[in-house]
Image (tube, grey):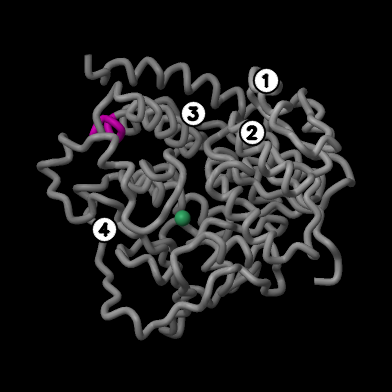
Amino acid sequence: MSNVNKLIILGSTGSIGKSTLEVIKHNNDNFNIICLTADSSSVVLAEQINFFKPKFAYLNNHLLIDDLKSRLTHNQTILITDIHQLHDLLKSDSYNTLVAAMSGSTGLLLTYIALQANKIVLLANKESLVMAGDLFSKYRKQIIPIDSEHNAIFQVIGYSDSEEINKITLTASGGPFRAYPRSKFEQITVEMALKHPNWSMGRKITIDSATMMNKCLEIIEAHYLFNLKSDQIDVLVHPESIIHSIVNYNDGSSLCQFSEPNMQIPISYALGYPNRINSGIGSFDLSTIENLNFSKIDHDKFPSINYAYEALNGSETSCLVINAANELAVNAFLEKQISFLSIFSIIEDSFRISQNTTGLSIEEILDADTLCRQKIKEIIKKYFIN
Ligand code: MG
């Protein structure tokens, strides 16, 4: 890389944020960290500020600012305390690349501001793309996906809109309940759902893997990122999580990307693009593995996959609604207010809220999101365990 990349990392204390900083440690001369942001992890953010010495840092939870300050040994970092100051920074020339690594819908506006300011966005926050797909797809050539499946597709096709592509196949580990009988789904606890077999991730995405809602959101993500029709996007269960996705061409050939299931690999590809940089992870040795398994999804066990196709073929705000319903239902499940199976019921009940409006602005999308969340909260109450 010829130029030093100036980065803002949103969500630096989460799983993707930490992996991003780990890759940067291996490529220190190539990156200059302008700003780190966190929601409420003041302890981890303080460690990161002391080590990486960013110019700015932002902590969303104001109650923890004093705690953050008390932990700093590096005092040159300017602490931003107002979200509007963060907006101004995102519009400024002080950086060129945004890593959108926060979880859930909170990243939507911040990511959109960076796209409008003509920045490169390394996108791990799939929810923002699901919520505002039509709007974001106008900027899709500024986006490099970090999500491992989409990064795998991107490594094969880049930004080409090739008509030679027949379809893409997103692989799915199948989560912790792949081989679990449907009859026992009623007994699934939060602790069981938080144990993912292959990937170490945040709590929300780990539950999304257990319900396969993660794959539902990823189908929608792929549709907008790669400009593909919904019937060109397929899902295949691959429990070993070695092959991260497959591109199928018209002539019967398929190309795939494979590696250890470690997020530092897609992150390093996105950070270095179009070059390859040190990810800190070694090559995958095929001789160490006896079998790679593939199977179709059991749609009766995991109705979530069909929600993606329903949403993409449905009304304008369907994707926004299922994202909000899923986020709120997952929170309620983690709080032990509802059962695992109720997550599906709540999303299905929420479909009827979606509206057929087109060409929504970012403000209208945020308003529609707020409104539908109020309605979904009422739906969720019907599923409370007590
Ligand atoms: Mg993924």
Which SS class for mark 3?
Answer: loop
Magenta-span inclusion, residue 344: yes
Q: Which mark is residue 124?
A: none
Q: Secondary structure at mark 4?
A: loop
Total count of labels: 4
Q: Amino acid at mark 4?
A: Ile
**In the drawing, what numbered circle is on residue 360?**
2
Report the disc number at residue 355. Answer: 3
Residue named by callout 4: 297
* Frontmost residue, 223 versus 384: 384
Pair 1/2: label in front: 1
The residue that mark 1 highlights is 62
Q: Amino acid at mark 1?
A: His
Q: Residue at x 47, y 22 (%)?
A: 373
Q: Quadrant of the N terminus?
A: bottom right
Gap between marks 3 and 1, in whole Å?
36 Å
Tell me where residue 5 sits by quadrant: bottom right
**Are the residues at dot 4 and dot 1 in contact (C-beta closer than 8 Å)?**
no
- Residue interval drawn in magenta: 341-345
**Which SS class for mark 1?**
helix
User: Disc 2 marks which amino acid?
Assistant: Leu
* Gap between marks 4 and 2 measured at Cα: 34 Å
